[in-house]
Amino acid sequence: MGKPNELLHALSQPVNVIRLTVANIGARMLSRLEGDDKAYLADRLAVIEAQIERFVAITEQVDAIAEQGEKA
């Protein structure tokens, strides 16, 4: 895991598992809930997904910077 792109790939793997788990929880549980509980869970899952998107954006930026460094 010496190169930056290898490190970024290693970091993305658990994030992908978290993303799939969040989607599975939503798919299974949201249909079983109603009212405030359903809204609360949907909101919390959306917060997690937003943070995953933020992480992905940051890793893409780091990857682009690393590529520029390798070309220099």
Image (cartoon, grey):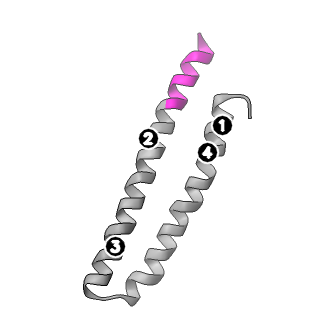
Image quadrant holding the N terminus, namely top right
Disc 3 versus disc 1: distance between alpha carbons? 32 Å
Query: In the rendered structure, which disc, 3 or 2, sits on the residue that comes first in sequence?
Result: 3
Query: In the rendered structure, which disc, 4 or 2, sits on the residue that comes first in sequence?
Result: 4
The mark total stands at 4
Q: Label 2: which residue?
A: 57
Marking on residue 11 = 4
User: Are the two marked residues, 1 and 4, in contact with CB atoms closer than 8 angstroms?
Assistant: yes
Which residue lies most toward the left here? 35
Magenta-drawn segment: 62-72
User: Are the two marked residues, 2 and 1, in contact with CB atoms closer than 8 angstroms?
Assistant: no
Q: Label 3: which residue?
A: 42
> Residue 36, how many percent across, how many down?
25, 83
Disc 2 versus disc 1: distance between alpha carbons? 15 Å
Q: Label 1: which residue?
A: 7
Question: Amino acid type of disc 4?
Answer: Leu
Question: Amino acid type of disc 2?
Answer: Ala
- Secondary structure state at the residue bearing disc 2: helix
Query: In the rendered structure, which disc, 3 or 1, sits on the residue that comes first in sequence?
Result: 1
Neighbours of disc 1 within 10 Å: few (<14), some (14-19), many (20+): few
> Residue 41, how many percent across, how many down?
36, 75
